[in-house]
Amino acid sequence: MTKVLIATEKPFSGVAVKGIKEVFDAAGYEVAMLEKYTEKSQLLDAVKDADAMIIRSDKVDAEVLDAAKQLKIVVRAGAGYDNIDLAAATAHKVVAMNTPGQNANSVAELVFGLLVFGVRNFFNGTSGTELKGKKLGILAFGNVGRNVARIAKGFDMEVAAYDAYCPAEAIEAAGVKAAKSQEELFETCDIVSLHIPATAETKQSINYDLVGKMKKGGILVNTARKEVVDEPGLIKLMEEREDLKYLTDIKPDADAEFAEKFAGRYFATPKKMGAQTAEANVNAGIAAANQIVGFLRDGVTKFQVNK
Ligand code: 3PG
């Protein structure tokens, strides 16, 4: 019998797990759950006899793939797949997929949760500002960036975006001003929201010089990945510029230092919350389940991210 492992250190909502199980029940697959695990050894053990696996930000490296002797497919229920060693997956003849767009609205809504909290001075009772009329810069115009743009318009914000891989015409077609470069985006916007993946090119790219281009009172929001931010550079900048705020859904490695030095203008969620809604879990989880059945039964490789 085909066995699917759902390995989620940060579990899906119950309703999502129910929906995922229904897909596999209908296909006649067995499901094993590994939730809230604390040791890698638990994953190495659970994956031994799995034919397929659904993960979230769980790390799938060469060691996990070595242990997964039966594995044919791993689906990251979500957008970013920097947690999968793609070369190792290919070497092990394992197909890796993501589920693009399925949790995008959830992440985009959190951007505004963080922003309202930020501009109202973390609800400390003092007068803050409104988002209306402010210029929001969206760095990378993928599924999340597009949802952020849609919601920002409801707040009556001016919206601009830059995406190295998306032509300006496509950005403008969505009713968003296309910036010519990421430098221009940081220079001209009151708030910049990061939606870039963590790649060799983007890691540490949000640095002292770039963020330093922001106007007085600038706010940087990160619901993407901690790795894209050059933490020492941002700390140095925020020490020099007491007007800047950093709001993040991914705790930096230097969280304690940020929290100590920048009280009132730094906030990190205790655990990454962007995709942590019932809706996003259902959308991404069930899409992942359907993609597994589609691949194992019909050979469908849409959304494969390794070659
Ligand atoms: C993603 O890449 O889809 C998001 O960062 C969500 O990650 P999560 O599933 O770990 O919450």
Image: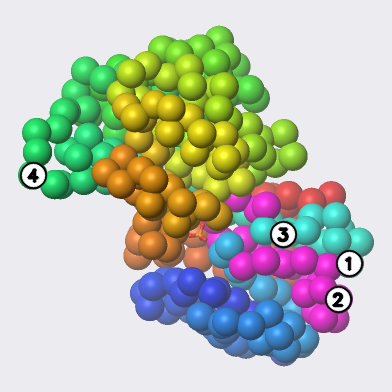
Residue ID at (35%, 65%) = 278
Q: CA distance from mark 3 to mark 1?
A: 12 Å
Any magenta on residue 156? no
167 over 21 or under it: above or below: above
Three-letter code, disc 4: Gly
Q: Which badge, 1 or 2, comes first in the chain's sequence?
A: 2
Q: CA distance from mark 2 to mark 3?
A: 13 Å
Magenta extent: 58-82
Q: Pick the residue in front: 257 or 96.
A: 257
Three-letter code, disc 3: Ile
Locate residue 34, reporting x and y percent: 57, 84
Q: Nearer the viewer, mark 1 or mark 2?
A: 2
Locate residue 300, reporting x and y percent: 72, 57
Q: Which residue is mark 1?
A: 92
Relative to 133, 260 lies left or right: right
- Badge 4 vs badge 3, beta-carbon distance below 8 Å: no
Residue 112 makes an appearance in the image: no
Q: Nearer the viewer, mark 4 or mark 2?
A: 4
Q: Which residue is mark 3?
A: 84
Q: Which badge, 1 or 4, comes first in the chain's sequence?
A: 1
Relative to 48, 280 lies left or right: left
Locate residue 129, reporting x and y percent: 16, 28
SS at badge 2: helix
- Badge 1 vs badge 2, beta-carbon distance below 8 Å: yes
Q: Residue furthest right?
A: 91
Locate residue 246, reporting x and y percent: 39, 39
SS at badge 1: loop
Residue ID at (34%, 29%) = 242
Q: Which residue is mark 2?
A: 66
Q: Which residue is mark 4?
A: 125
Q: Which badge, 2 or 3, comes first in the chain's sequence?
A: 2
